[in-house]
Image (spheres, rainbow, N blue to C red):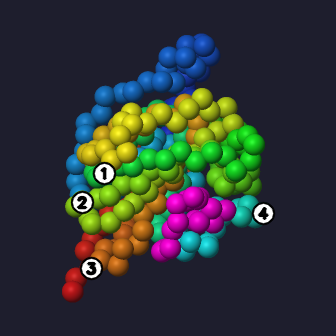
Amino acid sequence: MPTSLAEWLPAAKKKYENIDWNHWSHEDFLRDPCRAQRVDSRYFFSPADGVIIGQACVSPDDDVVEAKGVEVTLADLMKPWPIDQPCLVINIFMTALDVHINRMPTGGILTHEPAGPIRTSNLPMLWIEKGIIEKGVIFKKGMQYVKDNARMLNRVWSTNLGFWYYMVQIADSDVSAIMPFDHRKHAPLAQSERFSLVRWGSQVALVIPLDPRYRFRTLCNVTDHVEAGTDPLVKMEEHRR
């Protein structure tokens, strides 16, 4: 079940307060806990463990970051892939305390493509990390990294729904790699199945085009903590004719 940041954070911090840093950074950080694989085509499950730091329906030229002085549009997020329709965008920040295995929100044929940083190097995400872990709040003014950092673009053709949806993995400045588990360009994957590992970061954006055949209802709130493949983010209902 999704939990509020205020409820999740104390328990998560308590678990690691007596763990050696080297053990955590080299062993526990890479943990891959066994989880039941949930399958329900009415829902998009979370692709990542982490804190929801934003969710909104936006057009290609609208900002996907609600922060003064940070201009990052949906088109920026998706470059170099073109996007020409409004989408529901849900941004999930993976803290250092989270599992970093990413899972499929719903089943489909996955294609991925790396996109290098717009700048010569990635910008740090530490401002967001420290705000969540130390103060339990989201400081958005440092989120220019959404536009400038290296990304992995993931496009999924949902055979059940009949449309494409996307996941954008965004790397931190200290990231080692975004590591897909299946290197085929068109890999068939089931709902909640593992598809990638992000090392030392970072953020995942779930991008769902607003297909007029469906109504999309968000199920979580900004600042909720969610788990990949377990917690539903969006419920879909067909429009009645």
Give the answer, above or below, for where 50 lies relative to 45: above
Considering every residue shown, the one lying at the far right of the view is 69
The amino acid beneath tag 2 is Thr
Do callouts 4 and 2 mark residues in contact (Cβ within 8 Å)? no
Q: Is residue 179 visible?
A: yes
Task: Kindly identify which residue carries mark 1.
Answer: 109
Q: Nearer the viewer, mark 1 or mark 3?
A: 1
Which badge, 3 or 2, comes first in the chain's sequence?
A: 2
Crowd tier of the residue under label 3, counting other residues whose Cα lies within 10 Å: few below 14, some 14–19, many 20 or above = few
Q: Nearer the viewer, mark 4 or mark 2?
A: 2
Task: Kindly identify which residue carries mark 3.
Answer: 239
Secondary structure beneath disc 3? loop
Of 114 and 240, nearer the camera is: 114
Do callouts 4 and 1 mark residues in contact (Cβ within 8 Å)? no
The amino acid beneath tag 4 is Gly
Task: Kindly identify which residue carries mark 4.
Answer: 69
Point 56% across, 72% down: residue: 60
Secondary structure beneath disc 2? loop
Point 39% across, 37% down: residue: 183
